[in-house]
């Protein structure tokens, strides 16, 4: 039975005062949607990661590109990544193998009362991106992607928040270097060049924009998910 068919199947007509327990239905649908999202994540790893699985591409068909996966911060902040301290021994394993889409059925049954942690996005993606950031770091931080050398400091710090402790330190120190070494008559910007004189990126003079709230990503994540990320120490 397809997803939409099951939705129709569970539609009922209720008379006034009728009490119906939908907890079983909700648990069932949660299992279905989780299986669908897990399927999409597997497909994204095929299309969105480089052929060797070492980093994310800027576009699905741009094989020589790379990009910052700042959206991993949302995955962690929503506590969808309950095992941030796993070893990097799983790098380049089965997540990047070919996946053939079949009918829309659960990949595997999920126990709704299971206490086993489940990472929505595989930890190997986090670890490999962190390793790539370390290789791509410039004097004043991490470029946004492979198209240019300017960076977005808000997204850079979101990416750093879910990177290894060493990469976090590199990012924070590089931004501090930019603040100390470059000249500007404007408030802290979220767009600047990571090399040369560290000028404002792409000729834009962004200043004190609301997006700089993301500069507190490291602090915020340390208070989320029972402090799991604050205590996490990666084996690198």
Image (tube, rainbow, N blue to C red):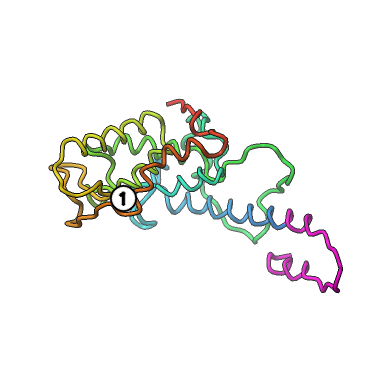
Q: Residue at x 50, y 34 (%)?
A: 229
The residue that label 1 is drawn on is: 65
Number of numbered discs overlaid on the protein picture: 1
Q: Residues within 10 Å of mark 1 (few under 14, many from 20)?
A: some
Identify which residue, 102 or 83, lies in the foreground: 83
Location of the N terminus (image quadrant):
bottom right
Tell me where residue 228 appears, x and y as whole percent.
Answer: 54, 33
Image location (x, y in percent) of residue 210: 35, 54
Q: Is residue 177 left or right of residue 6?
A: left
Please state, as top left, top right, bottom left or bottom right, where the C terminus lies in the image.
top left
Left/right of residue 72 with respect to residue 68 in the rendered view: right
Asked if the stretch drawn in magenta spans residue 221, the answer is no
Tell me if 31 is positioned left or right of 212 in this view.
right
- Which quadrant of the figure has residue 171? top left
Q: Classify mark 1: helix, strand or loop.
A: loop
Q: Is residue 10 magenta?
A: yes
The residue closer to the viewer here, 70 or 34, is 70
On screen, residue 235 versus residue 145, left or right, reads right
Quadrant of the rendered image containing residue 142: top left
Looking at the image, residue 42 lies above or below residue 161: below
Q: Residue at x 68, y 54 (%)?
A: 30
> Could you tell me which residue is drawn at 57 percent across and 38 percent down?
82
What x and y, as percent, mark residue 5? 72, 69
Residue stretch rendered in magenta on the structure: 1-28
Q: Residue at x 17, y 42 (%)?
A: 195
Q: Position of residue 174 (x, y in %)?
A: 26, 35
């Amino acid at each position: 039975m397809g997803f939409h068919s099951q939705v129709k199947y569970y539609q009922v007509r209720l008379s006034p005062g009728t009490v119906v327990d939908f907890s079983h239905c909700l648990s069932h649908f949660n299992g279905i949607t989780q299986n669908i999202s897990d399927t999409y994540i597997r497909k994204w790893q095929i299309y969105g990661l480089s052929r060797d699985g070492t980093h994310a591409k800027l576009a699905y068909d741009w094989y020589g590109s790379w990009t910052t996966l700042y959206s991993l911060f949302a995955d962690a902040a929503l506590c969808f990544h309950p095992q941030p301290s796993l070893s990097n021994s799983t790098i380049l394993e089965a997540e990047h193998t070919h996946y053939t889409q079949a009918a829309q059925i659960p990949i595997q049954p999920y126990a709704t009362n299971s206490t086993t942690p489940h990472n929505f996005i595989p930890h190997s993606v986090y670890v490999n991106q962190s390793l790539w950031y370390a290789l791509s770091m410039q004097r004043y931080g991490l470029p946004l992607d492979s198209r240019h050398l300017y960076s977005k400091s808000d997204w850079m710090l979101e990416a750093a928040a879910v990177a290894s402790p060493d990469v976090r330190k590199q990012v924070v120190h590089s931004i501090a270097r930019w603040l100390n070494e470059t000249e500007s008559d404007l408030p802290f910007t979220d767009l600047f060049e990571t090399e040369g004189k560290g000028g404002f990126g792409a000729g834009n003079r962004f200043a004190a924009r609301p997006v700089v709230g993301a500069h507190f990503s490291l602090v915020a994540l340390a208070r989320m998910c029972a402090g799991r990320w604050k205590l996490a120490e990666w084996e690198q």
